[in-house]
Image (cartoon, grey):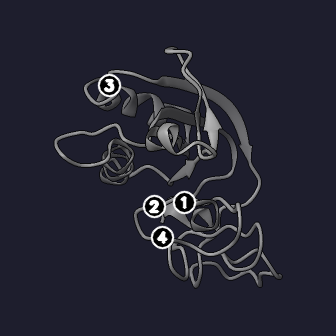
Protein backbone atom coordinates (compact mmCIF):
# COMPACT_ATOMS: atom_id res chain seq x y z
CA UNK A 1 0.00 0.00 0.00
CA UNK A 2 1.19 3.48 -0.81
CA UNK A 3 1.63 5.71 2.22
CA UNK A 4 0.34 9.18 1.57
CA UNK A 5 0.09 12.03 4.08
CA UNK A 6 0.65 15.74 3.99
CA UNK A 7 1.19 17.73 0.83
CA UNK A 8 0.11 16.05 -2.39
CA UNK A 9 -0.99 16.94 -5.92
CA UNK A 10 -4.49 16.40 -7.33
CA UNK A 11 -4.74 15.72 -11.06
CA UNK A 12 -8.20 16.19 -12.55
CA UNK A 13 -8.97 15.20 -16.13
CA UNK A 14 -12.29 16.44 -17.55
CA UNK A 15 -13.52 14.49 -20.58
CA UNK A 16 -16.82 13.46 -22.12
CA UNK A 17 -18.53 10.26 -21.04
CA UNK A 18 -18.62 9.03 -24.64
CA UNK A 19 -14.91 9.70 -25.31
CA UNK A 20 -13.17 6.48 -26.33
CA UNK A 21 -9.66 5.06 -26.43
CA UNK A 22 -9.38 1.99 -28.64
CA UNK A 23 -13.08 1.01 -28.24
CA UNK A 24 -13.01 1.49 -24.47
CA UNK A 25 -14.20 4.45 -22.38
CA UNK A 26 -11.39 7.01 -22.05
CA UNK A 27 -11.99 7.44 -18.31
CA UNK A 28 -11.51 3.68 -17.84
CA UNK A 29 -8.20 3.77 -19.70
CA UNK A 30 -6.98 6.69 -17.56
CA UNK A 31 -7.88 4.88 -14.31
CA UNK A 32 -6.19 1.67 -15.43
CA UNK A 33 -3.03 3.50 -16.52
CA UNK A 34 -2.91 5.33 -13.18
CA UNK A 35 -3.21 1.96 -11.43
CA UNK A 36 -0.45 0.46 -13.59
CA UNK A 37 1.74 3.47 -12.78
CA UNK A 38 1.33 2.70 -9.07
CA UNK A 39 -0.40 5.95 -8.20
CA UNK A 40 -2.12 6.15 -4.81
CA UNK A 41 -5.65 6.25 -6.22
CA UNK A 42 -8.02 7.35 -8.95
CA UNK A 43 -11.78 7.90 -9.02
CA UNK A 44 -14.23 8.80 -11.77
CA UNK A 45 -17.11 11.20 -11.20
CA UNK A 46 -19.94 11.67 -13.67
CA UNK A 47 -21.45 15.11 -14.01
CA UNK A 48 -25.12 15.82 -14.58
CA UNK A 49 -24.55 18.96 -16.61
CA UNK A 50 -21.69 20.96 -18.06
CA UNK A 51 -19.95 22.49 -21.04
CA UNK A 52 -16.38 22.81 -22.18
CA UNK A 53 -14.34 24.30 -25.00
CA UNK A 54 -17.09 23.52 -27.53
CA UNK A 55 -19.56 25.69 -25.52
CA UNK A 56 -22.27 23.06 -26.07
CA UNK A 57 -24.15 22.38 -22.83
CA UNK A 58 -24.55 18.67 -22.08
CA UNK A 59 -27.26 17.82 -19.56
CA UNK A 60 -29.02 14.77 -18.22
CA UNK A 61 -32.32 16.67 -18.44
CA UNK A 62 -32.55 16.58 -22.23
CA UNK A 63 -32.40 13.18 -23.88
CA UNK A 64 -30.66 14.49 -27.00
CA UNK A 65 -27.85 16.09 -24.98
CA UNK A 66 -27.42 13.33 -22.37
CA UNK A 67 -25.22 11.14 -24.57
CA UNK A 68 -21.95 12.86 -23.65
CA UNK A 69 -22.16 13.98 -20.03
CA UNK A 70 -19.04 15.42 -18.39
CA UNK A 71 -16.74 13.05 -16.53
CA UNK A 72 -13.93 13.97 -14.13
CA UNK A 73 -11.10 11.54 -13.37
CA UNK A 74 -9.38 12.54 -10.13
CA UNK A 75 -5.95 11.22 -9.13
CA UNK A 76 -4.14 12.14 -5.90
CA UNK A 77 -0.53 11.28 -5.08
CA UNK A 78 2.84 12.85 -4.32
CA UNK A 79 3.64 15.68 -6.74
CA UNK A 80 6.61 13.92 -8.37
CA UNK A 81 4.57 10.77 -9.05
CA UNK A 82 1.64 12.70 -10.55
CA UNK A 83 3.96 14.79 -12.75
CA UNK A 84 5.72 11.63 -13.95
CA UNK A 85 2.29 10.30 -15.01
CA UNK A 86 1.43 13.34 -17.18
CA UNK A 87 3.23 12.11 -20.34
CA UNK A 88 1.02 8.98 -20.25
CA UNK A 89 -2.02 11.27 -20.50
CA UNK A 90 -0.70 13.15 -23.53
CA UNK A 91 -1.43 10.31 -25.92
CA UNK A 92 -4.89 9.69 -24.42
CA UNK A 93 -6.50 13.10 -23.98
CA UNK A 94 -7.03 14.75 -27.34
CA UNK A 95 -9.96 16.90 -26.13
CA UNK A 96 -10.81 17.99 -22.61
CA UNK A 97 -9.20 19.77 -19.71
CA UNK A 98 -6.36 18.63 -17.45
CA UNK A 99 -5.69 20.50 -14.20
CA UNK A 100 -3.26 20.19 -11.29
CA UNK A 101 -4.00 21.50 -7.82
CA UNK A 102 -1.98 21.18 -4.62
CA UNK A 103 -3.87 19.47 -1.81
CA UNK A 104 -3.28 18.15 1.67
CA UNK A 105 -3.97 14.52 2.51
CA UNK A 106 -5.46 14.21 5.97
CA UNK A 107 -6.19 10.51 5.94
CA UNK A 108 -5.45 7.67 3.49
CA UNK A 109 -6.20 4.29 5.04
CA UNK A 110 -7.77 1.26 3.38
CA UNK A 111 -9.93 -1.45 4.87
CA UNK A 112 -8.05 -3.98 6.91
CA UNK A 113 -4.77 -2.25 6.19
CA UNK A 114 -4.46 0.14 9.09
CA UNK A 115 -4.22 -0.42 12.80
CA UNK A 116 -6.49 2.52 13.59
CA UNK A 117 -10.11 2.02 14.48
CA UNK A 118 -12.32 3.86 12.02
CA UNK A 119 -15.57 5.53 12.94
CA UNK A 120 -18.77 5.55 10.84
CA UNK A 121 -18.17 6.74 7.29
CA UNK A 122 -14.40 6.55 7.67
CA UNK A 123 -13.84 3.04 6.42
CA UNK A 124 -15.34 3.22 2.95
CA UNK A 125 -18.90 2.67 4.04
CA UNK A 126 -21.65 5.12 4.77
CA UNK A 127 -22.46 8.44 3.22
CA UNK A 128 -19.46 10.43 2.14
CA UNK A 129 -17.10 7.67 3.22
CA UNK A 130 -13.73 7.04 1.74
CA UNK A 131 -11.61 3.97 1.53
CA UNK A 132 -9.22 2.14 -0.69
CA UNK A 133 -10.88 -1.01 -1.94
CA UNK A 134 -14.43 0.15 -2.66
CA UNK A 135 -16.72 -2.09 -0.69
CA UNK A 136 -20.00 -2.92 -2.37
CA UNK A 137 -21.10 -2.39 -5.94
CA UNK A 138 -19.17 0.46 -7.51
CA UNK A 139 -17.77 1.58 -4.16
CA UNK A 140 -19.64 2.46 -1.03
CA UNK A 141 -20.85 5.85 0.10
CA UNK A 142 -22.68 8.65 -1.64
CA UNK A 143 -20.29 11.21 -3.06
CA UNK A 144 -17.36 9.67 -1.20
CA UNK A 145 -13.92 9.63 -2.70
CA UNK A 146 -10.89 7.50 -2.26
CA UNK A 147 -8.24 5.44 -3.90
CA UNK A 148 -9.23 2.77 -6.38
CA UNK A 149 -12.74 4.14 -6.81
CA UNK A 150 -13.96 3.69 -3.27
CA UNK A 151 -17.05 5.63 -2.48
CA UNK A 152 -17.34 7.02 -5.99
CA UNK A 153 -20.06 4.57 -6.96
CA UNK A 154 -22.68 6.57 -5.09
CA UNK A 155 -21.91 9.48 -7.41
CA UNK A 156 -22.05 7.33 -10.54
CA UNK A 157 -18.29 6.84 -10.56
CA UNK A 158 -16.07 3.89 -11.14
CA UNK A 159 -12.64 2.84 -10.03
CA UNK A 160 -10.16 0.02 -10.37
CA UNK A 161 -11.34 -2.02 -7.38
CA UNK A 162 -14.56 -0.12 -6.70
**Cα–Cα span, label 1 and label 4:** 9 Å
Q: Say which residue appears at 64% left-offset and 38% top-offset.
A: 49
Tag shown at residue 162: 4
Is 156 located above or below residue 102 in the figure?
A: below
Res. 3 image quadrant = bottom right
Please tell me which of labels 1 and 4 falls first in the chain.
1
Q: Residues within 10 Å of mark 3 (few under 14, many from 20)?
A: few
**Cα–Cα span, label 1 and label 3:** 21 Å
Are the residues flagged by discs 2 and 4 in contact, CB closer than 8 Å?
Answer: yes
Residue 54: x %, y % from top left:
49, 15
Looking at the rendered image, the disc whose residue lies closer to the viewer, 2 or 1, is 2
Residue position marked by numbered label 1 in the rendering = 147
Are the residues flagged by discs 2 and 1 in contact, CB closer than 8 Å?
Answer: yes
**Cα–Cα span, label 2 and label 1:** 8 Å
Q: Mark 4 falls on what kind of element?
A: loop
Residue position marked by numbered label 3 in the rendering = 87
Amino acid sequence: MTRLTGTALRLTVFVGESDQWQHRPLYTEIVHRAHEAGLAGASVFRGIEGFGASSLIHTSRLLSLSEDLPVAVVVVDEAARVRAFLPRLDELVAEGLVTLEPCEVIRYVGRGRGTESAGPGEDGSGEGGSGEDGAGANGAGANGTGADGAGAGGAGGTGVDG
